[in-house]
Each structure stands twice: as structure tokens, then as C-alpha cells.
Image: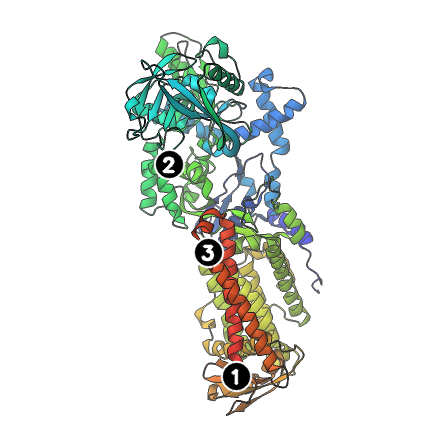
Amino acid sequence: MSIDKTYNPAATEAKWYPLWEKSGAFACNPSSNARPYCIMIPPPNVTGSLHMGHGLSYTLQDVLIRYHRMKGLDVLWQPGTDHAGIATQMVVERELAKEGLHRRDMGREAFLKKVWEWKAESGGTITRQLRRLGASLDWPRERFTMDEGLSKAVTREFVALYREGLIYKDKRLVNWDPKMMTAISDLEVEQKEIKGHLWHFKYPIEGMKDEFIVIATTRPETMLGDTAVAVHPENERLKHLIGKNAILPLVNKPIPIIPDEYADPEKGTGAVKITPAHDFNDYEVARRHKLPMVNIFDAHAKLNDEVSEKYRALDRFVARKQIVADMEALGLLDKIEPHVHTVPHGDRSGVPIEPWLSEQWYCDAQKLAAEAIKAVEDGQTQFVPKQWENTYYAWMRNIEPWCISRQLWWGHQVPAWYGPDGKTFVAEDEAEAQAQADKAYGKKVKITRDEDVFDTWFSSALWPFSTLGWPEETPELKRYYPTDVLVTGFDIIFFWVARMMMMGLHFMKKVPFRTVYIHALVRDEKGQKMSKTKGNVMDPLDVIDKYGCDALRFTLANMATPGRDIRLSPSRIEGNRNFATKLWNAARYCRMNECAWDPAFDPARVKHTINRWIVGETRRAADKVTSCLDQYRFDLATSAVYDFIWNTTCDWCLEFTKPILSGEDEAAKAETRATTAWVLAQMLKMLHPFMPYITEELWEQIVGNGKLLMTESWPQLPDALAHEDSREEIDWVIRLVSAVRAIRAELNVPAGAKIPLRIKDANDISRARLKTHEAVIVRLARLSGTSLVTNTPKGSAQSVLDEATLILPLADVIDLEQERARLGKESEKWAVEIKKLEAKLANRDFIARAPEEVVTEHRERKAEAEAMLAKLKSAQKSLAG
């Protein structure tokens, strides 16, 4: 059976994924004697669709999963999705609004029914897209953070922590979204740069006629909630006012002028109004000075009954205009300046969030963090790259109480009930809570359930063990926990990684994962963050449609260098599509030359030098890829397999073997065919974790043993295959041909020109190698012949190969003087370019002001220019004399 002339990624992908899934090859085997290996997928939002960040994360996870599966481990890649409280509720509310419906008119039960209906119909988009990426997840084990088992786990978590005193209610400042009418986490806050104003107001000083302290604010509407004015204790201009009172305009209430280092003497007027209930910094100042906290907004961000009747029920931005007008009428508006500043917005609602004092449920994260910090310090869990440990420590050692409640309807409802006088009863179900209440009151009473739901991260914190059946003691929980590695982005180290560490250690008494691999951001080719507004988003599915899934996966893995963001360009993906084509053509070449798979073939017994060499190179490549994957160096692993396939095998080995396969020596031909088929099989295995589709297709066509490649054994080749003598010999030939090719390219020798090669000072080993491989050298270096000489003809280019000198007489082929002049001019041009770039990079202003991607681009241009200059100098040197 011949292999199709052209590789068709779409047809191959459509063929193999259903076959893989149907075969059961993705499944773990809890009864296996093999060592378990487990990765928990960071559960994508049920509302989500695949973006390039997902593409990177899930590709790297699948590489690890396929690699360890082939190594014979019992692999579980746990799939699932997150209910994504606020995101999902907003999607469904938007859909209902098209029908003129609002959740509050429908009631909680009817609304939640609609959400579940939406989830059933539209919530599986991202899992379908994960299949397009080739992700080999154990799909029958798919979990959802709102399914029955996980809901039970979350309830158990809350009740247990509450009874231990680690969960409590408190009135604190939160990020309040007045459109969604809920507290939101910092991760759901988006900072936007806004062109606004800085209003300078004069606050009169109590008992001092015509004395004022001027404050500057971007939020005049909050002044009605001011409870102090802060001045830096060393502010020479204003410190005489510390200890006095300012009269809060419009309220006519005295508020103290306090000393606090938060007030920067160099910023604004040097005096800062303190509004504790509506600013996070002010809240901390108020706690230090025990100031009252006056909440002047309701849940809709309208002014409440704490303010005078004139302002009540006004929207915050309407109130702003009114207050500015009233201050101006009183002569207390000093000036207005244009001011660009960042304003936090709800990332879902798009409206400015309000720091708002409200009663919420909190978790004592500080106590839970102690063991989680120690676990990383002790090496129970290791971060890769290691420097992310510092980020983890910084967050964990300064951790604040964790607000775990949300004023939504979609989510895990807080299992707390309230008696007639507000007394709290926490229980795993209503019957237990009712029994507690009846006992407490000494009679049957009516209890009401808390309407709040949990922060999504509260349930996600249990993901590594709730998905395995906790709180039940399941066989899966015993076998696969702790998991081996978590692959995730740096932006959720605090929100998710840290919380899984806390909950895993608290409930399971073990870390949830042994390794945390932190991957980089995927940016566009200029280094800019991808965003819809910039129009630079690359949709993974569009890329797969154009270039094939394998090309995208290989590119992402190849660019996953630790500590460096990925600058993804279509040209890189196209290059790796060409790599897939190169592999396909190599397989076709093997098939056309009758290189058939022989299960009885023993690579240790090959005799021909070329075959011994390529067997040794295959072993070295397999060792390199294995070592790199074990160290999470996806970039180096892909480079190793790419170099082995494209350069070692296609560019050299197949060229070396052409004369053998077209020759008359039948024994050499048979050995070479079997060797080539064996090498192709090993390279398919090495490449499979990165490019699963093309490798599976070629495995079927080349090996055709009825087994899936994904279930084959990873190549672990013995030392006996090293064949060092053959390696040294063929390496010498490759270096000789490469040196001649380099001279031809650098000196613009016409491709069709066949030139003689003279070799001077060659020792006996080099002479023997030249004699054995002369025909191949002449063909690959495009020579007219070779000879051994004792002197150097005039007008020759030279290169050194070990003890020998390679000489190419070029006087009759190119104009040497013209070539020297060209090389000189080119060298000068690049030297000037390097000086310009060096000057730019030495300029501190440029480094400080230019965007990071521009500085990086200049550094890369300098490196490229230096490499080009070095090449030109080498060419000049070869023409010397």
C-alpha cells in the first residue's frame, strides 16, 4: 500500500480522534500494578471556548500524558469543567434578557433550571474543542464542579472549616460589582486607564477662620463618607494641622487630621481624604487609627440613608456632578485638573467596581497557609521554573482573609441557616440545621437558608481530590492522590494553586501535586498581549484549520522556554507544518524503497557503518528527548526530535543510504531497509506526544502491527547501540561536507559549479575515511573530485577540519577581488548597525520608556547582526592569502 502523495491534516485528525477515544486507550486502570501518574486538568469555565493560552496549557499536559502512557505508567488525565459562577450567570441572564425576562422576576428555582438547561445545550463547547486539540483525556471520568459528588465535597469542606473556627462572618471591604450585585475576586477585576479629573477641594479647619486644608480626589461622591484627613507626619508644610479637625463640607461634621505615612507629601496636595468604607488603602489607614467606617452606598452604588436627603438615591456618578456643583457654590472648589488614572472594572459586567463595606463569609487563609508554605519550603511540592516559588511565598506570607461568599444564584449555596433572631446554624443539610435550631430555641422554629453562594475558587480548591471521590474513601483517591504535576499559568498561583495547596494539606494531609509547572503567556509575534481590541488574537481552531493540529502543538511546545513569554507568529506554525510534510515525505521515500518494518530486526547487530551510525544517533536522540521531558524542557525536547528527524535522518542518513539502496549489494540493501524502517518507527514514537496525528497515521502505514502508536512503548534503547566508532567516522564526513557547503554559500559560489577539493596534512585516519566515503562526499558537496596535496594553490578558500586543511581553488570560479570587496562592504554595514543598536540599548531613557517588546526586539536584532558579522568575518578569513 502506497502512502498518499500529500499529507492531509484535517482528514487524519477526523479519522484518529474518534478511534482513540473509542479504543479506551485514554483510560486509566485503577486495578493496574503499574505506577500511577496523574494530572488534573485546570477545569476550563463551562462558558469558555478554546484560546491560545488554553492551547499551550493543554498541549503541554497532553505531551506529558502521552509520554508517561508510552513509558508504561497507569495514566489518569482527569477532565472536567468549572461552573464559573459569575460568568455563567451573566451569559444566561443575557439570554433571558432577549426574551424580556429577569432572574429576580422568575425566582431562584426557575432561574437555576434555565442555567442547567443552558449548560446541557451549550456548556460542552470547550470539551469538544479540547478533542480538536488532540487532548487524550479520560472522558468517561469527566467531572463538573456543580455535579452531585463535588457539591457534597464543598458542603463538607465548609461545614468542617466552620466547626474548626476557620470560617466566619465579618464586615470588611470587598470588590463590589454594582451591576451583578455581588462581591468579586481580584482576578475578576480589570484595571482600565481612564481620562478623568482631579478635583481639589478646600476643607475648612475647625476654629481657624479662613484656614483650609486642600485635598485632591478623583471621586468627589465618596467625600460624604470621609472620616479623617491624613497628612504625612514629616510634611513640614502641613504637620502643624495634625491633631486639629477639618470640617467635612456638605456634612458640616468635624473629622480629625491624622498623621499617616500613606499621605505622600510629593503627591497631589500632600493631604489625603480618608473614606474607609470605599477605598482599600483608606480602609487600612482607618484600621490603624481606629476610625469609624461610614458606608454611603447601597448595593446598586446609589447613595443611601447615611447621607443627607438631598443626595439620597442618586447614582454615584450623578451624585459626583451634584457634589462638585455644591462645593463650587460654597467656594470650596479650589481647581479641577485633567487626570489619567486606572479605574477597576468588573471584567464581566464592564462597570467600575465599588470598594464596599459589607458582611461576607470569610476563611482564615492565614492559618491554612502555614502548612502550604512549609510544604514548598520542604520540597514536597516544587515549582518549575523555581523562581515562581518567590511569587507563591510573597502572596502566602502576606495573605488576607479570603472572602468566600458571592451574592449570586448560580453556584454552591452556603449551607447555613438563620433562626428568627439571626442565630446561625451550619449543617450538611436542612434537616440537620433544623434539628440544631429546634434544640437551641427549645421549640420548633422557622429557619431561613443563606442566599449566598461560594466563590468559584472555594470549590475549585478541592479539585485534585473531590474529582477522585472525596469525601468518600474511593480506590481512585487512594491511588491517584497526590497527583504528579499541575500545569497552569502564573496568574492563578494565588487564586487556585495556593488554595488547592491549603485545602489538600488540610483535608488530605498531603500536598495535592508534587510539581507545579508554570507556563508563560502566549503573545503575538511583536510580543504584545493578545486582545480583541488590538485585533491580534489568534484563534487556535482557525490555526488548526489552516496548518493542522500537529503544527500548532509542536510550535507551542517548542516555544515553551522557561521564564520567557511565547511570541507566536504564523510563520513559525507554517514552518512546523512544513516539518510535518518533511516527515511525511521521508516516510513515502522509505515506502518507495521497500523499507519494511521487521519485528525481528535487531539494531545491535547491524554491520554497515551508516546503519551503525544512525542506530547510535537514534539512541542518543531518544535519550535526549527523554531527559528533556523529565525536566519539563519541552522546548529542548522538540528541538532534539526536530534536529534528529530533519537534519540527522532526512538531510544526512537518507542521502547517505541512497547509493546503497540503488546498488547491487543485496545484503547491504536488506540491512539498510530494515534499519531505516526501525529508525522511522523510533522517530514516530519520539514525536508522538507532540504530533500525535501524523505519527499515528504513519505508524499504521509503516509498521501496521494492528496496535495504536499511542499505546506502544517509549523508546528506551540500550547502551550497546551507541556505536561510537561509526559515530566518529560519519561525523567527520558530515563536518567535511558542511564546511565545503558553508564556503560555497558564504562566497557565492554558483550552485551548479563543481569544484575540486584539496586536502592538506591529513593523517591516516582521515585518508582512510576520505577513501571510504569519497563518492558520497563528492555528491553531497557538489565537487568535481578530491585529492591529497602538500601545498595551497593561490586564490583558494580554506577551512580547518581537525588536523587537516580543506582547500577549495576558486580563482577560476569567482572573482576573488570582487568577492573580497563585497564581504568588506557587507561587514562595514553590519558593524554600523551593531553600533547603532548598542548605543540605543546603552541609553537608560530608551530602556526605561520603551515597551518591553521593543527593547527585546532591539536585543534580538543586535544578536542577529553580530551573528551575520561573524559569518562575514569567517568568509573573509577563508579567502585570506
* In the image, residue 682 above or below residue 225: below
Residue 457: give x, y in percent of width and height.
Answer: 46, 33
Helix, strand or loop under label 3: helix
Sequence order check, earlier mark of 3 and 2: 2
Residue 652: give x, y in percent of width and height.
Answer: 58, 73
Residue that badge 2 annotates: 502
Left or right of 221 in this view: 441? left
State the residue at coordinates (40%, 22%). Answer: 275
Q: CA distance from mark 1 to mark 3?
A: 40 Å
Residue that badge 1 annotates: 806
Left or right of 46 in this view: 304? left
Residue 774 picture quarter: bottom right
Proximity of marks 1 and 3: CB atoms separated by less than 8 Å: no
Residue that badge 3 annotates: 841
Sequence order check, earlier mark of 1 and 2: 2
Q: CA distance from mark 3 to mark 2?
A: 44 Å
Characterize the local packing of mark 1: few (<14), some (14-19) or many (20 or more) Cα atoms within 10 angstroms: many
